[in-house]
C-alpha cells in the first residue's frame, strides 16, 4: 500500500502543484517542497522492507503489474527522492524570475515521480512505462529554456526513443516467450534460456541503458542536454536520471540473468563483460580529455558525468564483492557531488547573469565563499581526494581492476582521474581564483535557499568520505539480494580481511599534519595582505583589463590532444540523420502530383496483386 | 425500439433537413450524431451478448435481402464514427463560417451515413453503395473551401476514387457471377463450403483490395490522401483521417477475413502494411513545411501499421489493429482539429509559423502534444497500449518475417518521434518570430492569448481526455474491441448467425 | 471465332474498361480524363449486366403464362446497374463542376500543369 | 613506540629532503664547474625565510599551502621507511597515489589565489607536466601491483625482500628503467623545471611566495623529493630493513636520476611531454603487457 501511496503522491503531487500554481506562486512552491519532502520521508520509511504488490491488471495482455521494494530499488529511490527534494529547494530561488514556472515545477516533479516509478516497479512492463514517461517528460524540461536547448532536447529524445524501443523489443519478446513480465518470474525462466537468446536480450536491452547512461559511442546527447538544461534540473539529470542506465544494466545483468549465465556468455576471449569494460574505459578517457578542453562550466560537468559513468560500469561489470560495491557506491557518490557541482555552476550563473563561460569569470572566492567551498569539496569528490566520498568508491574499483588482473582498464581509469584533476582545477581556478573582474566586484553570495542544498551536499560528501560504512551497508544489502558475495565493511572503511581501508586514520593523519603545519605557519613572521595590483605590477599602473590567465588554460596540452578528440560518433550520427532526411525527401517524391501517375500506381498495384496471387 | 437501422436512418434523414433550415443547419449534425452516439452506446451491451441482425427490404430471410449486422465490430466502429462525428461537428459550429454552410452540413452527415452504413451492412453491394455515398460526399467536402488547392485535390481524389470504386464493382460482379449472391455471409459460406480455388476468386480479391485500398490508403494507392487532407477544411481532414480511411481498412479486413478467409495471403497484407507504414512515416519526416501534409503522411503511416496488424492474422493482431484504429481515429482527428485553429490563427500552414504558439494557444498546444505523444506511442497515452499490443502480437506470431516487420515498426516509431517532436518543440520552445510576442518582460505588452473559441475547444479537450483515459485505463474500450476481434476472426460464427435465421 | 462470339460482351466491356484506363493514364486534359472515367463506369456496368444475362432469355417477370424461370434473365444485376448508373452520373456531375471551378483558378485543364500539390 | 613511528618519518623526510635539495644544487654547481653552496644551505634558507615578513592574498593562499604540506607529510606516513610505516594498514599504494594529489592541488589552489598570471602559467605547466609523467608512472605502478598481486606497498616490499629486487627481476626491470627516466620530472628538477622557470615566468608558482610561504613551499619541495625517491626504493629496490641502508639506496637513486638528465637544457613543455610519452611510456607499456600476460 505504501508503494502505491508513494506513486500517487508523486504523480498527484505534480498535478496538484501545477494547479496550485494557477492560484498563487507561493502556494505552488510550498506544495512542491512538501511533495518532495513527503516522498523522502515515505521512502525512508520502507528501508529494509521487502514489499511486492499488484496494483493494476492489463486485461488484453493478461498482465498484472506489480510494485515492489527491495534493497536495490530502495537505494535508487532514496537517491531520486533526495536529489529531487534538494533540486526543488534550489529551484525556489534559482527559478524565481523565470517564466512558465508552473510548467517547470510540474515537469520536475513529474520526472521525479516517473523515475521513482521505474525503480519501484516489479515487472518489466511498468518499468518500461515509467521509463518512457521519464524520457518524454525529461525532454520537456531539457528544452525548457529554448534557444540552443531545443536542438539538445531533440537529440536527447530521439536517442532515448531509440533506446526505449530496443528495450520494448526485449520486453515484449520475453513476454511472448514466457507469458509474464514479473521480474522474479522472468529471472527464473531465463536460467534455462539458450545462449543466443540470452545474448539477444542482454545486448538489445543494454542498448537503451548505454544510451541513457551516455557511454562512449552513444554519449552524444548528454553534453548538450546537460549544459543547456536549467541548472537545478541539470543536477537531477546528471545525478539521477543518467544513472538509471546503471540501474537497468544491473537489473538485467544480475537480477534477471544472474552470474551463472553471465559467465557463460563468451566466445573465446571476448565476452559480454569485456565489451562493456572496453566501452567503459574508452568513455572514461575520452570524456576526461574532452572535458579538459571545454570552456563552459556546465559542459565541463556534463562531460565529467559521461566519464564517471565509465567508472561505475567498470565497477559493476566485474561481479566481485568489491567491484560491485564500488560501482554502486560510485553511483551514489557521483550523484552527490555532481549535483553539488551543478548547483555551484547554477549559483554562479544566477549571480553573474547567466555567465557559463568560465573564462569570463575569476576571483569569485572573495564574493561567494560558501559556493567556493562547495565547489572545492565537489571537485575533490570528483577527483577522489581522500576524505571525500569519491575516493572510497574509486579505491574499490581500482582495487578490483588491479587484483582482477585488468591493468589496462585500471590504467584507463587512472588516466581519467588525472584528466579529472586537470579540468577540476581549471574549473576552480578560472571561476573562483585569480583576479576578480571589475563587473563582478559587487555581486553577492548565493541566496540562502540555494546555499542550503549546497551545504547539505557538501557535508554529505565529507561524511560519506570519512564514514563510508554507512552507505556501504545499504549497498551490501543489494549484493545479498542478487546472491552476490557482499563486501565486509566497517564504519570507517574496509576491514583487513577484505583489503584494508581505514578512512579515520587518514582523517587523523591529515588533521594532525595540518595542525602541525599550521602551528609552524602561525609561529613564523607575519604577512600582510596586499592587492593584486600591488604585487603583480609592483605598484605601478596596470590597465584595468583582465590579466587573469584563463583562456585555453592547458594550451600546450590541448594543442596536442584536440586532434584526437574529434567526436567521431557525433559526426557519424549527424550524417545518419542527414542521410535519413535526404532519403525521406527522395521517398516522398513518389507523390509526384500528376494524377496520371497516380492512376498508373493503382493499375500497377492491381496487376501486381493478380500476378502475386497467381503464384501463390 | 433500439434498432441499428436508426444509426443510418437518422443521419441520412437529418442530412436533408439541413438545407431546409439554413441558419440552424449547423446544429443539425451535432444533434444527429449525439443521437447516434447515445444509440450506439445503448446498443453495446445488447450487441455484446448477441449480434443484432436487421432485415431490410421485404423481410425475406438472408441471403435474399439486404441485411444489417450490428456485430460488436460494427457497433464499435459505429460508436467511433458517431463519437468522432459528434465532436467534429461541434467543432464545426464555430469553424465552418464561410461558404454554403448548410451544404457542408448536409454533405457531412451524408459522409457519416456512408461510413456508418459501411460498417453495419452485411451485403456487399450495399457496402459499395454506402462507400460511394461516403466517397462522393468527401470529394465534395474536400473542395468545400473552393480554393485552388482544395479543388485540385478534390479532382485528383475523385479520379483515383472512381477508378477504385469501379474496381470494387468489378470485384462484386465477379463474385456475383460465381455465386449468384450478394450477401457477404452467403458468399463466405460458398467460398469456404466449396473451398474454391478458382483464379476468378483471386482476381476478385485483387480487385477488392485495390478498390478498397484506394479509400483505405495503402501504399501506392494513397496519393490522394496527402493532397486531400492538407487542402480540405480541418474538420474534413479530421473526419477523413479519423473515419473515412478507417472504413476502407474495415472493408479490406472484412473482405479478407470474412469473405475470403485468405490465410496464406495475410503475410502479403502485412507486407503491404509495412511498406505503407515506412513510406508514410518517412514522407512525413521529409515534409518539413506543411503541417497538415505532415499529419496526412503520418495518417498513411498509421494506416500501414493497422493493416500490418491485420496482416498478422492472429487474434492478438486483429485486436491490436482494432485498438490502434480506435486510438488513431481519436488522436488524428484531435491533431487535425487542434491544428485547424492554429493554422487559422497564424494564417499559415507552415510549420515554422507555429513557433511559440504554446504561449498564445496553451490549451490547443497541450492537446496537440497529447495527440502527438499518443501517436508516437508514449505512455500513458492510448497509442502506447495499442502499439504494444500490435508489437506483442507480431512477436507472438513466431514468424521470422513478422519479427523483422516488428523491428521495422519500431524503426518507424523513431521516425514518428522525430517529426512529432519537431512540431512540439516549435510549439513550446521556440520563440515566436513575430516580434510583438517576443519580449516577455517589462516594457512590451504581454503575449496575447488567442485561444480557439470554446465550442471548438470542448471537442478537442474531450478527445484528449479520452486518449489519456484509454491510456491509463484501457479497459474502457478493450472489452468491446476484444469481442469485435473475436467476431472478425470467427468466420463460421458470422455465417451461422446470419444464415441461421432460416 | 466461336470464343469471340460467345464472349463478345465480356470482350466489349473489358475493352471499354481498358480504353477508359488508357485515357486516364495517358491523357493530359481533365475533361478527357473524366470521359475516361465514364468509359470505365460504362464498361463496369456492362460487365454487371452481362453476368446476369442469358442469351435469348426473357424478362424476369411472369407477364404471361408459360414463361420458364430457367430462361429468365437474372434481375438483380439490372437493379445493381441502375444504382451504379446513378452513382456514375453523380460522380460525373461532381467531376465536371469541379473541373469548371478548377479552370477558373488555373486557367487550364492540363493536368500536367495542375500540380501545385505534390510531395 | 607507535608515536615514535609516527613522528620519525616526517622528521627524517624533512632532513633528507632538504639534504637532497642541497645536494642537487651542489651537483649542478659541480657540473657547471662552480663550487656551489654548502649542503646545509636549504635548511639555512628555510630558517631565514621563517623570520622574514611576507605578503599574502587571501585565505586560500594560506590554506592551500598548509594543505599541500600536510598532504606531503601524510604521504610520508604511508610510505615504508625502512621498517617503519605507521599507516601501512590504511589503504596501500592506491591511497598513496591519491594523497599525493593533495600536495600539487594545494599548491595550485594557493597559487591561484595569488592572482598572478605568472603563477597561473606555472600551474598550468605543472599540471600538464604531471599528466605527462603520471601516464608512465601509472603504468609502472600498475605493472608492479599486477605482478605482485597486491595493492599494499608493505606487501610489495616484503615480497621483494624474500625473493629479489624488482629492478633485477625479469619483466619489472623495464618499468624500473622507465621510472628512472621520468624521475627528474617527478622531482621537478632540471630539465623538467619548466613550471618554475625563473627566467621566463619569474619562477612561476613561487612568484608570490615570500617569507613563511616560501619556506613552506621549499619544505614541500623537499618532501616531494623524498617521496619520489623513496617510492622508487620501495618499489624496485626492495625497501630496506634499516634506515641507513634505505638512505644509501635513496642517495644512489637520486644521484643517478639527477645525472642522467642534468646536462640537458630546460625542455619546453611540449618537448617534455613528447619525451615523457615516448621512451618511458613505451618501456612501461611493454613491461605491463608482459606482466599481464605472465
Image (tube, coloured by chain):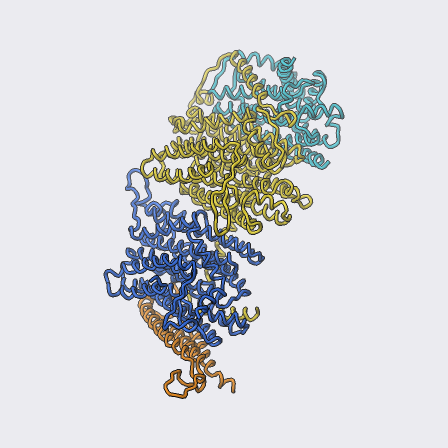
Using residue A405 as the reference point, say whether residue C18 is left or right of it.
left
Tell me residue A367's x, y (percent): 41, 25
Q: Residue lying farthest front?
A: B502
On the question of residue A537 being in view, the answer is yes
Q: Colour of chain C?
A: orange
**Image chain in blue:** B
Pick the residue in front: A364 or B366.
Answer: B366
The percent coordinates of residue A430 (x first, y second) are 48, 30
Q: Quadrant of the C terminus of chain D?
A: top right
Residue at x 44% of width, y 82% of height:
C53
Q: Quadrant of the N terminus of chain D?
A: top right
Q: Which residue, as the protein is rendered here, is positioned at the far right?
A: D163
Relative image position of residue A585 (x, y in whole percent): 46, 57
In the rendered structure, the colour chosen for chain A is: yellow
Residue A577, x across and y down, in percent: 50, 51
Q: Relative to A253, say whether C63 is above or below.
A: below
Judged left or right of residue D288, residue B174 is left
The tint of chain D in the picture is cyan
Q: In the figure, B422 relative to B322: above or below?
A: above
Looking at the image, which residue is at 31% across and 60% down? B32
**Along the line of sight, which residue is nearer the eye, D267 or A562?**
A562
Q: Nearer the viewer, residue B409 or A66?
A: A66
User: Left or right: B153 with respect to B101?
Assistant: right
Amino acid at each position: 500500500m505504501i508503494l502505491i501511496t508513494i506513486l500517487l503522491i508523486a504523480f498527484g503531487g505534480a498535478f496538484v502543484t501545477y494547479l496550485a500554481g494557477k492560484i498563487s506562486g507561493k502556494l505552488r512552491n510550498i506544495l512542491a517542497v512538501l511533495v518532495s519532502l513527503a516522498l523522502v520521508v515515505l521512502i525512508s520509511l520502507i528501508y529494509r522492507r521487502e514489499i511486492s504488490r499488484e496494483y493494476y491488471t492489463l486485461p488484453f495482455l493478461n498482465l498484472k503489474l506489480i510494485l515492489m521494494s527491495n534493497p536495490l530499488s530502495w537505494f535508487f529511490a532514496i537517491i531520486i527522492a533526495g536529489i529531487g527534494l534538494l533540486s526543488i529547494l534550489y529551484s525556489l530561488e534559482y527559478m524565481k524570475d523565470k517564466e512558465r514556472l508552473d510548467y517547470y515545477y510540474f515537469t520536475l516533479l513529474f520526472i521525479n515521480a516517473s523515475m521513482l516509478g521505474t525503480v519501484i516497479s516489479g515487472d518489466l512492463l511498468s518499468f518500461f512505462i515509467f521509463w518512457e514517461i521519464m524520457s518524454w517528460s525529461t525532454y520537456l524540461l531539457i528544452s525548457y529554456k529554448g534557444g540552443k536547448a531545443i536542438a539538445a532536447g531533440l537529440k536527447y529524445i530521439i536517442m532515448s526513443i531509440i533506446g526505449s524501443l530496443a528495450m520494448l523489443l526485449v520486453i515484449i519478446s520475453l513476454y511472448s516467450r514466457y507469458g509474464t513480465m514479473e521480474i522474479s518470474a522472468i529471472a527464473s525462466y531465463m536460467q534455462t534460456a539458450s545462449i543466443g537468446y540470452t545474448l539477444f536480450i542482454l545486448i538489445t536491452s543494454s542498448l537503451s541503458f548505454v544510451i541513457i547512461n551516455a557511454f562512449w559511442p552513444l554519449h552524444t546527447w548528454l553534453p548538450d542536454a546537460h549544459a543547456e538544461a536549467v541548472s537545478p534540473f541539470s543536477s537531477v539529470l546528471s545525478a539521477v536520471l543518467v544513472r538509471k542506465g546503471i540501474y537497468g544494466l544491473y537489473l538485467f545483468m544480475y537480477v534477471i540473468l544472474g552470474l551463472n549465465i553471465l559467465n557463460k556468455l563468451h566466445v573465446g576471449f571476448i565476452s559480454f563483460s569485456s565489451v562493456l569494460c572496453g566501452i567503459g574505459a574508452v568513455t572514461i578517457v575520452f570524456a576526461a580529455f574532452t572535458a579538459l578542453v571545454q570552456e563552459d562550466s556546465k559542459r565541463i560537468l556534463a562531460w565529467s558525468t559521461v566519464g564517471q559513468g565509465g567508472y561505475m560500469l567498470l565497477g559493476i561489470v566485474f561481479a566481485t564483492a568489491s567491484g560491485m560495491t564500488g560501482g554502486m557506491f560510485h553511483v551514489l557518490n557521483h550523484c552527490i557531488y555532481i549535483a553539488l557541482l551543478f548547483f555551484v555552476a547554477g549559483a554562479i550563473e544566477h549571480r553573474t547573469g547567466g555567465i557559463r563561460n568560465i573564462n569570463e569569470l575569476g576571483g569569485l572566492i572573495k564574493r561567494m565563499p560558501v559556493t567556493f567551498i562547495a565547489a572545492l569539496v565537489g571537485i575533490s569528490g570528483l577527483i577522489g581526494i581522500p576524505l571525500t566520498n569519491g575516493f572510497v568508491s574509486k579505491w574499490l574499483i581500482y582495487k578490483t581492476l588491479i587484483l582482477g588482473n585488468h591493468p589496462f582498464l585500471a590504467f584507463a581509469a587512472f588516466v581519467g582521474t588525472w584528466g579529472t584533476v586537470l579540468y577540476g582545477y581549471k574549473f576552480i581556478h578560472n571561476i573562483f581564483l585569480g583576479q576578480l573582474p571589475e563587473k563582478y566586484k559587487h555581486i553577492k553570495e548565493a541566496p540562502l535557499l540555494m546555499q542550503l542544498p549546497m551545504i547539505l551536499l557538501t557535508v554529505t560528501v565529507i561524511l560519506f568520505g570519512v564514514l563510508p560504512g554507512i552507505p556501504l551497508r545499504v549497498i551490501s544489502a543489494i549484493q545479498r539480494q542478487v546472491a552476490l558475495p557482499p563486501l565486509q565493511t566497517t564504519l570507517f572503511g574496509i576491514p583487513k580481511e577484505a583489503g584494508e581501508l581505514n578512512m579515520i586514520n587518514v582523517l587523523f593523519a591529515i588533521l594532525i599534519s595540518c595542525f602541525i603545519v599550521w602551528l609552524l605557519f602561525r609561529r613564523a613572521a607575519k604577512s600582510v595582505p596586499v592587492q593584486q595590483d600591488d604585487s603583480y605590477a609592483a605598484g605601478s599602473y596596470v590597465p584595468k583589463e583582465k590579466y587573469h590567465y584563463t583562456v585555453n588554460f592547458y594550451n600546450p596540452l590541448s594543442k596536442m590532444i584536440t586532434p584526437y578528440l574529434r567526436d567521431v560518433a557525433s559526426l557519424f550520427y549527424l550524417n545518419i540523420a542527414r542521410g535519413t532526411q535526404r532519403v525521406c525527401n527522395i521517398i516522398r517524391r513518389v507523390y509526384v502530383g500528376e494524377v496520371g501517375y497516380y492512376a498508373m500506381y493503382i493499375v500497377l498495384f492491381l496487376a501486381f496483386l493478380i500476378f502475386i496471387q497467381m503464384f501463390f | 425500439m433500439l434498432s441499428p437501422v436508426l444509426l443510418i436512418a437518422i443521419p441520412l434523414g437529418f442530412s436533408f433537413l439541413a438545407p431546409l433550415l439554413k441558419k440552424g443547419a449547423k446544429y443539425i449534425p451535432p444533434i444527429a450524431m449525439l443521437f447516434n452516439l447515445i444509440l450506439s452506446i445503448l446498443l453495446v451491451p445488447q450487441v455484446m451478448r448477441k449480434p443484432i441482425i436487421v432485415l431490410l427490404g421485404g423481410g425475406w430471410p438472408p441471403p435474399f435481402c439486404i441485411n444489417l449486422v450490428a456485430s460488436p465490430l460494427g457497433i464499435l466502429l459505429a460508436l467511433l464514427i458517431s463519437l468522432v462525428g459528434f465532436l467534429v461537428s461541434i467543432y464545426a459550429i464555430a469553424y465552418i463560417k464561410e461558404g454554403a454552410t448548410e451544404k457542408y452540413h448536409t454533405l457531412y452527415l451524408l459522409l457519416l451515413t456512408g461510413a456508418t452504413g459501411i460498417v453495419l451492412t452485411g451485403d456487399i453491394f450495399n457496402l459499395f453503395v454506402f462507400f460511394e455515398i461516403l466517397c462522393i460526399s468527401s470529394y465534395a467536402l474536400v473542395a468545400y473551401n473552393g480554393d485552388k488547392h482544395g479543388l485540385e485535390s478534390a479532382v485528383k481524389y475523385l479520379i483515383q476514387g472512381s477508378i477504385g470504386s469501379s474496381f470494387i464493382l468489378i470485384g462484386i460482379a465477379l463474385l456475383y457471377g460465381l455465386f449468384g449472391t450478394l450477401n457477404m455471409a452467403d458468399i463466405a459460406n460458398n467460398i469456404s463450403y466449396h473451398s474454391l480455388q478458382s483464379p476468378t476468386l483471386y482476381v476478385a480479391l485483387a480487385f477488392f483490395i485495390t478498390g478498397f485500398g484506394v479509400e483505405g490508403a495503402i501504399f501506392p494507392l494513397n496519393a490522394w490522401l496527402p493532397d486531400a487532407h492538407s487542402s480540405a477544411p480541418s474538420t474534413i481532414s479530421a473526419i477523413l483521417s479519423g473515419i473515412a480511411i478507417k472504413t476502407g481498412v474495415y472493408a479490406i479486413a472484412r473482405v479478407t477475413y470474412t469473405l475470403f478467409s485468405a490465410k496464406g495471403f495475410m503475410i502479403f497484407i502485412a507486407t503491404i502494411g509495412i511498406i505503407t507504414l515506412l513510406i508514410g512515416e518517412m514522407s512525413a519526416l521529409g515534409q518539413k513545411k506543411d503541417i497538415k501534409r505532415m499529419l496526412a503522411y503520418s495518417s498513411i503511416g498509421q494506416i500501414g501499421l493497422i493493416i500490418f496488424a491485420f496482416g498478422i492474422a492472429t487474434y492478438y493482431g486483429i485486436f491490436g489493429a482494432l485498438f490502434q484504429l480506435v486510438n488513431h481515429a481519436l488522436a488524428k482527428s484531435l491533431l487535425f482539429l487542434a491544428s485547424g485553429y492554429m493554422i487559422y490563427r497564424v494564417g499559415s500552414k507552415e510549420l515554422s509559423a507555429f513557433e511559440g504558439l504554446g504561449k498564445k494557444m496553451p490549451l490547443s498546444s497541450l492537446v496537440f502534444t497529447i495527440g502527438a505523444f499518443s501517436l508516437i506511442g508514449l505512455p500513458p497515452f492510448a497509442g502506447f497500449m495499442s502499439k504494444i499490443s500490435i508489437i506483442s502480437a507480431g512477436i507472438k506470431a513466431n514468424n521470422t518475417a513478422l519479427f523483422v516487420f516488428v523491428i521495422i515498426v519500431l524503426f518507424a516509431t523513431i521516425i514518428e518521434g522525430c517529426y512529432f517532436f519537431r512540431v512540439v518543440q516549435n510549439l513550446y520552445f521556440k520563440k515566436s518570430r513575430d516580434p510583438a510576442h517576443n519580449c516577455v518582460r517589462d516594457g512590451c505588452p504581454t503575449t496575447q492569448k488567442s485561444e480557439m473559441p470554446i465550442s471548438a475547444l470542448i471537442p478537442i479537450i474531450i478527445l484528449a481526455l479520452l486518449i489519456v483515459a484509454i491510456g491509463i485505463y484501457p479497459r474502457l474500450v478493450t472489452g468491446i474491441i476484444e469481442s469485435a476481434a473475436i467476431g472478425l476472426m470467427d468466420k463460421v460464427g458470422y455465417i451461422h448467425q446470419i444464415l441461421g435465421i432460416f | 471465332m466461336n470464343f469471340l462470339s460467345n464472349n463478345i460482351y465480356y470482350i466489349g466491356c473489358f475493352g471499354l474498361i481498358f480504353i477508359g484506363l488508357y485515357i486516364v493514364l495517358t491523357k493530359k486534359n481533365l475533361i478527357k480524363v473524366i470521359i475516361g472515367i465514364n468509359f470505365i463506369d460504362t464498361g463496369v456496368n456492362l460487365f454487371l449486366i452481362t453476368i446476369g444475362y442469358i442469351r435469348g432469355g426473357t424478362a424476369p417477370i411472369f407477364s404471361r403464362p408459360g414463361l420458364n424461370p430457367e430462361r429468365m434473365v437474372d434481375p438483380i444485376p439490372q437493379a445493381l446497374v441502375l444504382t451504379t448508373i446513378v452513382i456514375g452520373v453523380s460522380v460525373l456531375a461532381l467531376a465536371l463542376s469541379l473541373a469548371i471551378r478548377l479552370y477558373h483558378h488555373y486557367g487550364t485543364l492540363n493536368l500536367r500543369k495542375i500540380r501545385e500539390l505534390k510531395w | 613506540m607507535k608515536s615514535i613511528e609516527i613522528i620519525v618519518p616526517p622528521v627524517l623526510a624533512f632532513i633528507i629532503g632538504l639534504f637532497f635539495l642541497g645536494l642537487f644544487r651542489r651537483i649542478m654547481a659541480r657540473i657547471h664547474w662552480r663550487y656551489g653552496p654548502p649542503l646545509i644551505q636549504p635548511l639555512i634558507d628555510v630558517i631565514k625565510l621563517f623570520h622574514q615578513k611576507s605578503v599574502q592574498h587571501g585565505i586560500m593562499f594560506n590554506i592551500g599551502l598548509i594543505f599541500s604540506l600536510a598532504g606531503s607529510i601524510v604521504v610520508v606516513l604511508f610510505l615504508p621507511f625502512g621498517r617503519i610505516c605507521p599507516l601501512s594498514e590504511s589503504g596501500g599504494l592506491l591511497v598513496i597515489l591519491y594523497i599525493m594529489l593533495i600536495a600539487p592541488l594545494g599548491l595550485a589552489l594557493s597559487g591561484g589565489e595569488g592572482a598572478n598570471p605568472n603563477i597561473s602559467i606555472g600551474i598550468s605547466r605543472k599540471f600538464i607536466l604531471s599528466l605527462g609523467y603520471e601516464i608512465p608512472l601509472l603504468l609502472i605502478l600498475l605493472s608492479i601491483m599486477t605482478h605482485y598481486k597486491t595493492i599494499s606497498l608493505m606487501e610489495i616490499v616484503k615480497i621483494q625482500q624474500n625473493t629479489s629486487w624488482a629492478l633485477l627481476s625479469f619483466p619489472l626491470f623495464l618499468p624500473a628503467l622507465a621510472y628512472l627516466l621520468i624521475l627528474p620530472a617527478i622531482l621537478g628538477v632540471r630539465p623538467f623545471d619548466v613550471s618554475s622557470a625563473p627566467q621566463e615566468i619569474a619562477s612561476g608558482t613561487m612568484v608570490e611566495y615570500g617569507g613563511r610561504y616560501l619556506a613552506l613551499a621549499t619544505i614541500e619541495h623537499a618532501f616531494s623529493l623524498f617521496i619520489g625517491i623513496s617510492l622508487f626504493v620501495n618499489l624496485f629496490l626492495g625497501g630496506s630493513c634499516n634506515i641507513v641502508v634505505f638512505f644509501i639506496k635513496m642517495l644512489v637513486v637520486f644521484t643517478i636520476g639527477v645525472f642522467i638528465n642534468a646536462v640537458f637544457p630546460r625542455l619546453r613543455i611540449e618537448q617534455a611531454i613528447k619525451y615523457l610519452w615516448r621512451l618511458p611510456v613505451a618501456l612501461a607499456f611493454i613491461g605491463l603487457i608482459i606482466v599481464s600476460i605472465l
